Amino acid sequence: MEYQLDNTKLTINRKLSSLKSLFDYLQNKAEISDLEPYIQRNVMAKMDLNVVKESQETIANRIDGKILREDDFESFRLFVAHDYGKINKENKHIFNFHQFNRERDTAIVSPHFRIRS
């Protein structure tokens, strides 16, 4: 994954973690008709994830622009309530889906629904 697909160690960890979860589910939770697990041996159980050490600054730079700040909430709420429908008015499927779910989606992103610490 790293050399042929040029994945970062974080990306590889996410993919391996997903596979580990799938195999754990197939061995410990999912059952076939006679109550036996789908798989007897979890080949991912001994697979170790990459050790990735990142500084707080590196983490902050990676997530910068992916989270909303206090002053961004109102413009995002307005975008969900109105602008998303406007920019997708040519696509009837997306537009109709937006119209149907607009009130719900706006309520979800409204400030009074946020959990404050």
Image (cartoon, rainbow, N blue to C red):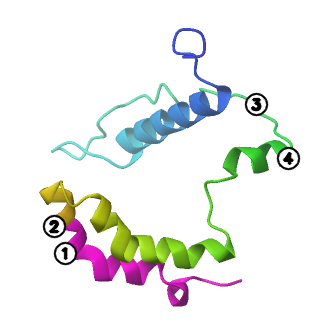
Label 1 residue SS? helix
* Callout in the foreground (3, 4): 4
Residue 96: mark in rendering: 2
Question: Which residue is labeled 4 in the image?
Answer: 57
Q: Are marks 2 and 1 in contact (CB under 8 Å)?
A: yes
Residue density around tag 3, few if under 14, some if 14–19, many if 20 or more, within 10 Å = few
Q: Amino acid at mark 1?
A: Phe
46 lies left or right of 31: right
Q: Quadrant of residue 82?
A: bottom left
Q: Residue 1 at x, y = what percent? A: 54, 16
44 lies left or right of 83: right
86 and 112: which is toward the camera: 86
* Callout in the foreground (2, 4): 2
Q: First in sequence: mark 2 or mark 3?
A: 3
Label 2 residue SS? helix
Residue at horizontal 62%, vertical 61%? 67
Residues drawn in magenta:
96-117
Q: Amino acid at mark 2?
A: Asn
Residue 46 appears in view:
no
Q: Residue 79 at x, y = what percent? A: 43, 70
Question: Which residue is labeled 1 in the image?
Answer: 100
